[in-house]
Image (cartoon, grey):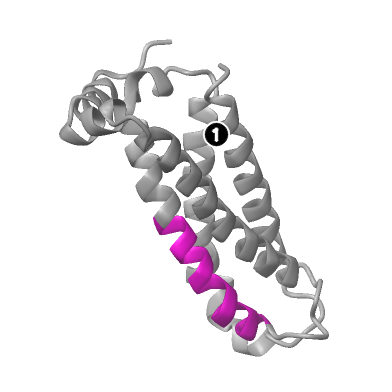
Amino acid sequence: MDMPDLLHSSLMMLQSSALGDVVRNARYLYPVLEAIHILGIALLVGPGFTFDFRLLGIGHRFVSVTTAARYLLPVSHAGLAIAATTGVALLSAQATAIASAGAAPWKFGLLILAGLNVAVFHGGIYRSVDKWKDVAVAPIAARIGAAISMMAWAGIIFAGRLLAYT
């Protein structure tokens, strides 16, 4: 299936940008960006999964949800900034080829799902966290959000790796 014209032209603009030229033509830049991207993913997903596990009840005897959020989420946000920045740079090198790979709709769709999940979680159930921050079992909405988060990010990682092979 062909991609819509607006998407294709946007990808072509990114690919033909100065950033795309630099990433394509600098000798070691692409693999360095890939390594930094992986480190960003680790910083994003490691603390994120730890927080999600706490929402699922693991570690409830040791740390409240709010304490876990205070220490883990800023690291996860830094990882997201690193992964997103390097991801755009990596995409710029060959945007149209990557976007037409079979795994691309999965990766980008799951990224949208993960972002929506964060917005719904923080705009919804997390607003009442002071009522349930110390309970062993978080409310069902928080646990569903944690499960969606873990599945989405695991899927994003798998789909990202498959981009090179599809």
Considering the whole magenta stretch, tell me its main secondary structure.
helix
Residue drawn at x 60%, y 48% as measured from the top left = 153
Q: Which residues are magenta?
A: 65-81
Across and down, in percent, residue 21 comes to 22, 28
Residue 81 position (above or below residue 47): above
Across and down, in percent, residue 140 comes to 73, 67
Quadrant of the rendered image containing residue 110: top right
Residue 75 located within the stretch drawn in magenta: yes
Across and down, in percent, residue 119 comes to 47, 61
Residue 119 visible in this rendered orientation of the protein: no
Quadrant of the rendered image containing residue 10: top left
Closest to the observer, 128 or 81: 81
Is 117 left, or right, of 132 in this rendering? left
Is 142 left, or right, of 98 in this rendering? right
Across and down, in percent, residue 166 comes to 56, 16
Residue drawn at x 57%, y 75% as measured from the top left = 126
Q: Which residue is mark 1?
A: 160
Closest to the observer, 8 or 126: 8
Residue 63 visible in this rendered orientation of the protein: yes
Q: Residues within 10 Å of mark 1 (few under 14, many from 20)?
A: some
Q: Secondary structure at mark 1?
A: helix
Residue 3 located within the stretch drawn in magenta: no
Q: Which quarter shows the N terminus?
A: top left
Residue 20 position (above or below residue 135): above
Residue drawn at x 53%, y 79% as measured from the top left = 127
- Residue type for callout 1: Gly
Residue 16 position (above or below residue 72): above
